[in-house]
């Protein structure tokens, strides 16, 4: 009856009755002091939080503007996964641990029309996790890339708040025509080293801009950190300048990275509407946004300064560079040019996973 009312396991209720009976058999002093109960989960498994974080690394999404993060699996499924690893943790305890680790819960809000999820969605998440593990185990680099939200450079109102003696006075309008320029930032997050690199320009967020930033990262840091690497794994969103349907993105990867640097590039795209699971969103962009929250970005030098000043207690450091030049929109790549690419689609979700190899001279 108690099990039906409370939802507790009958075995748990029996243990509780046995503990209570043992407590009542003691002396009055012993009953007043109470007997120590079972050890807490943290006492039983001191490493449980780090294990849980590692388990959820590929299941975590985050807001690129704040510290909020969440997981796409239920606490019951997490409890089952922990049990397979040898950790007996109730799903109620999993909820508490998630809250301690900074994860948040939200209720459903009916605000949008229903859209069916792709049946390949879960398969793609599992495949991305396996590719990350394989590249990291082989000592090859894994980078997460994306373009950050464009920022108006000028004395405009900035989202958020900051500690200051007096409120900063800014322009009462925020029209792009009033801006000194519009800053476009393309970020690269090195998963292994926990380091971010951001290239800032005043041109559009185009495939040429994105691939140029990745190439600059390899020449500046990648080839020195990974001197023996022959291949690179790129985690990217499903759309935008580095989307899986973008011909110019693939063509630029072939000509600028693979052919130009002799590097094989594997790209795994996150499914549609799943960009928040891209590690760069919560590992890099959220901290940059919080670092300049409430502070007007009055110049490009100030933008670069705030990005370079971003750091976290977990060891994140960020470097920022100005990427000059013009990268116009509307770059066209013909069907014949696409057929000449040394592109091999993977068997798993071939639209989202592919490898581009360097071409030999004359190909």
Image (tube, rainbow, N blue to C red):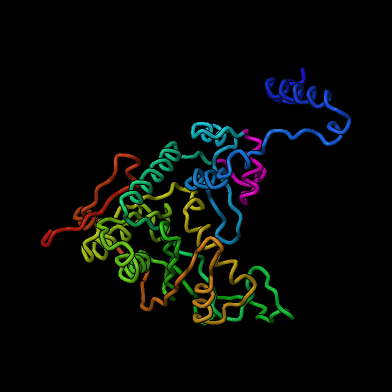
Residue 241 x, y percent position in the rendering: 39, 61
Q: Is residue 179 something that shows in the picture?
A: yes
Residue lying at 44% horizontally and 76% vertically, measured from the top left: 202
Residue 230 x, y percent position in the rendering: 24, 57
Residue lying at 49% horizontally and 65% vertically, measured from the top left: 148
Q: Is residue 333 something that shows in the picture?
A: no
Q: Main secondary structure of the magenta part?
A: loop
Q: Which of 300 and 59 is in front in this view?
A: 59
Q: Which residue lies furthest to the right in this view?
A: 28
Q: Which of 133 and 109 is in front in this view?
A: 133
Is residue 112 on the magenta stretch? Answer: yes
Q: Is residue 163 left or right of residue 54?
A: right
Segment tinted magenta in the rendering: 90-114
Residue lying at 29% horizontally and 43% vertically, measured from the top left: 346
In the rendered image, the quadrant that contains the N terminus is: top right
Instruction: Give the quadrant of residue 196.
Output: bottom left
| Badge count | 0
In the rendered image, the quadrant that contains the C terminus is: bottom left
Residue 74 x, y percent position in the rendering: 58, 37
Q: Which of 70 and 133 is in front in this view?
A: 133
Instruction: Give the quadrant of residue 186.
Output: bottom left
Q: Nearer the viewer, residue 205 or 97?
A: 97
Q: Is residue 2 left or right of residue 129?
A: right
Rendered view: 204 above or below 286: below
Residue lying at 42% horizontally and 63% vertically, measured from the top left: 188
């Amino acid at each position: 009856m108690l099990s039906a009312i409370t939802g507790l396991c009958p075995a748990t209720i029996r243990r509780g009755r046995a503990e209570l009976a043992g407590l009542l058999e003691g002396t009055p002093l012993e009953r007043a002091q109470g007997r120590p109960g079972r050890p807490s989960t943290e006492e039983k498994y001191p490493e449980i939080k780090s294990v849980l974080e590692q388990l959820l690394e590929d299941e975590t999404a985050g807001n690129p503007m704040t510290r909020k993060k969440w997981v796409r699996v239920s606490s019951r499924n997490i409890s089952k996964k922990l049990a397979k690893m040898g950790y007996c943790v109730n799903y109620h305890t999993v909820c508490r641990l998630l809250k301690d680790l900074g994860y948040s819960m939200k209720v459903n809000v009916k605000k949008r029309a229903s859209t069916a999820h792709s049946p390949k969605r879960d398969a793609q998440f599992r495949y991305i996790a396996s590719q990350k593990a394989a590249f990291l185990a082989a000592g090859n680099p894994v980078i997460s890339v994306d373009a950050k939200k464009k920022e108006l450079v000028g004395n405009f109102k900035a989202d958020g708040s900051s500690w200051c003696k007096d409120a900063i006075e800014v322009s009462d309008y925020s029209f792009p025509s009033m801006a000194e320029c519009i800053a476009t930032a393309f970020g690269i997050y090195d998963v292994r080293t926990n380091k971010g690199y951001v290239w800032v320009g005043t041109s559009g967020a185009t495939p040429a801009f994105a691939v140029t930033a990745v190439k600059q990262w390899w020449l500046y840091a990648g080839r020195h950190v990974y001197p023996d690497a022959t291949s690179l794994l790129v985690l990217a969103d499903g759309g935008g300048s580095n989307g899986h349907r973008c011909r110019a993105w693939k063509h630029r990867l072939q000509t600028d990275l693979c052919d130009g640097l002799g590097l094989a590039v594997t790209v795994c795209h996150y499914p549609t509407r799943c960009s928040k699971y891209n590690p760069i969103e919560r590992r890099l962009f959220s901290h940059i946004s919080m670092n300049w929250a409430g502070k007007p970005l009055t110049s490009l030098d100030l933008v670069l300064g705030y990005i370079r000043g971003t750091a976290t207690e977990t060891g994140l450091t960020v470097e920022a560079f100005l990427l000059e030049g013009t990268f116009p929109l509307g770059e066209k790549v013909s069907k014949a040019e696409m057929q000449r690419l040394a592109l091999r689609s993977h068997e798993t979700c071939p639209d989202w996973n592919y490898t581009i190899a360097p071409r030999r001279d004359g190909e």
